Image (spheres, grey):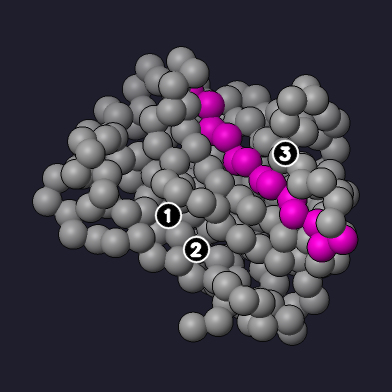
């Protein structure tokens, strides 16, 4: 059964920036916290969702990089296997902000989900149709996870990646993380991660 609106929560959104490179598995199984330790995390604002009577489906979002790839993970309030007879689309939207002043680009990974199973994955630049998915990995079991090479994002050193997750059904939004803004990641050498402006306390 699809999650219902949450009431009675008193929980503000929490954001933790990336501190080290990560190299997690992306098969969709929740194999433990340590594979994603050091990733940027955003925990949902349950209080805000309850106040607006919205469905609360997405619990925690993770994003992080290594030398060559962007990794994303999404935790749900209930396992996708319990989404009976539900067809929906999970979008991972990545805006690339180049350090050299090039125009910002927006890419989307579109994961089709039917009855709790991942049925198709497409990737492309927003407004430009589908692109080759070479090098992309994605999995959906108890969580959703994916890996996208920097080469597909045209993400050179110094680029900022702005990551946002959203869940859609019948072209209507069900939930998103973050609700506002995005998870910002800097494409920088690992020692420089903690010196980025958003990583400072």
Residue that numbered label 2 is attached to:
41
Dividing the picture into quadrants, the one containing residue 175 is: top left
Can the viewer see residue 33?
yes
Decide: few, some or many residues near mark 2? Use Cα within 10 Å; few <14, some 14-19, many ≥20.
many
SS for tag 1? strand
SS for tag 2? strand
State the image coordinates of residue 77 (x, y, percent, origin top left): 33, 45
Query: From what the image shows, is residue 80 above or below residue 59?
Result: above
**Residue lying farthest to the left in this orientation:** 8
Dividing the picture into quadrants, the one containing residue 156 is: bottom right
Q: Which residues are magenta?
A: 88-100
Q: Are marks 3 and 1 in contact (CB under 8 Å)?
A: no
Image quarter (top left, top right, bottom left or bottom right) of the N terminus? top left
Could you tell whether 146 is left or right of 7 in the image?
right
Residue that numbered label 3 is attached to:
107
State the image coordinates of residue 47 (x, y, percent, origin top left): 23, 52
Q: Are marks 3 and 2 in contact (CB under 8 Å)?
A: no
Can the viewer see residue 130?
no
Residue that numbered label 1 is attached to:
60
Q: CA distance from mark 3 to mark 2?
A: 20 Å
Q: CA distance from mark 3 to mark 1?
A: 21 Å
State the image coordinates of residue 78 (x, y, percent, origin top left): 33, 42
SS for tag 3? strand
């Amino acid at each position: 059964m699809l999650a219902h609106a949450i009431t009675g929560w008193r929980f503000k959104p929490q954001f933790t920036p990336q501190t080290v490179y990560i190299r997690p598995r992306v098969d969709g199984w929740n194999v433990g916290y340590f594979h994603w330790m050091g990733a940027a995390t955003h925990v949902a604002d349950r209080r805000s969702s309850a106040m607006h009577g919205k469905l609360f489906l997405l619990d925690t979002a993770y994003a992080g990089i290594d030398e060559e790839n962007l990794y994303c993970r999404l935790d749900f309030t209930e396992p996708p296997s319990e989404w009976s007879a539900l067809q929906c689309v999970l979008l991972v939207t990545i805006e690339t902000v180049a350090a050299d002043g090039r125009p910002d680009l927006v890419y989307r990974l579109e994961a089709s989900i039917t009855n709790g199973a991942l049925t198709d994955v497409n990737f492309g630049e927003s407004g430009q149709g589908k692109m080759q998915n070479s090098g992309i990995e994605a999995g959906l079991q108890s969580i959703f996870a994916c890996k996208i090479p920097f080469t597909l994002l045209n993400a050179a050193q110094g680029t900022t990646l702005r990551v946002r997750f959203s869940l859609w059904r019948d072209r209507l939004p069900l939930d998103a993380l973050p609700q506002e803004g995005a998870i910002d990641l800097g494409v920088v050498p690992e020692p420089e991660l903690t010196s980025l402006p958003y990583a400072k306390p």
